[in-house]
Image (cartoon, helix red, strand yellow):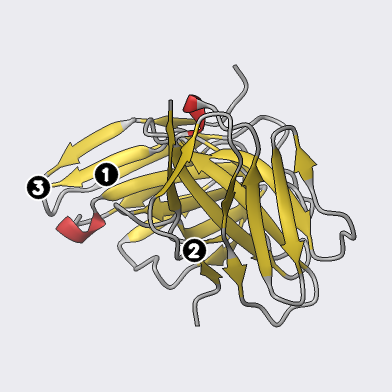
Amino acid sequence: AQKITQTQPGMFVQEKEAVTLDCTYDTSDQSYGLFWYKQPSSGEMIFLIYQGSYDEQNATEGRYSLNFQKARKSANLVISASQLGDSAMYFCAMREGTGANSKLTFGKGITLSVRP
Amino acid sequence: DTGVSQDPRHKITKRGQNVTFRCDPISEHNRLYWYRQTLGQGPEFLTYFQNEAQLEKSRLLSDRFSAERPKGSFSTLEIQRTEQGDSAMYLCASSLARGNSEQYFGPGTRLTVT
């Protein structure tokens, strides 16, 4: 089974509106971490937000928030007040287990296009 | 700038040649990772180091691939006898040795094997 599933086709959003990018994950570990990264056309991977499996509150970082639903194994990224510069690929990733196992498993990504 | 740097940014090579890439992590980070990303896919884990010790290698890392981090600072990834299927973006990342520590990525080395 896929560990990280991102199935949305290319997403479009109007500038200044909010958008939700979906991510579901699969793990049998009790301790894990979920990450979102942005990859603009220039290619670099930019860290956006992190959610730990034991965190009770949803993570927020500026315009980014993570809608974490543990029972449903989903970790959706919400971008508020979209900007033209948000147009990029967005990847959800998971780290399983505790700190000694720190590799990330990535989904296939979602393309977001922000319309002016 | 103290971000992760990679060299070269682009490499074109002929099938059968050997190539070596370098990664310089953020100076205080003791973990260093290599990933490979092909077009339309997310990055796939190849290997990682904590200081100079290589702690995990993916089964994607065939015996033609070797990575080193001799002094626990920069790392090299060598591919011997390159094949067309090796064409990809090779990404390096670094982090602190802490479970929830985010990984910071370099700009990548794009390899094209002709």
The residue where tag 1 is placed is B19
Relative side of A59 to B70, left or right: right
> Given the image, what chain letter belongs to the residue carrying mark 2?
A
Q: Is residue B31 visible?
A: no
Q: Which residue lies at the image location 34% right of the left edge and 30% below the top edge?
A: B8
Mark 2 and mark 3, same subunit?
Answer: no
The residue where tag 3 is placed is B114
Q: Quadrant of residue B94?
A: top right
> Given the image, what chain letter belongs to the residue carrying mark 1?
B
Q: Secondary structure at mark 3?
A: loop
Q: Which residue lies at the image location 17% right of the left edge and 38% below the top edge?
A: B12
The residue where tag 2 is placed is A6
- How far apart marks 2 and 3 lie (CA) works out to 32 Å
Of the pair A43 and B92, the residue shown nearer to us? A43
Residue A83's x, y, as percent? 54, 27
Q: Which residue lies at the image location 9% right of the left edge and 47% below the top edge?
A: B114
User: Amino acid under label 1?
Assistant: Val
Q: Quadrant of residue B13?
A: top left
> Given the image, what chain letter belongs to the residue carrying mark 3?
B
Tags 2 and 3 in contact by the CB under 8 Å rule? no
Q: Secondary structure at mark 2?
A: loop
Position of A104 relative to B2 (above/below): below
Residue B36's x, y, as percent? 39, 53
**Residue A73: mark:** none
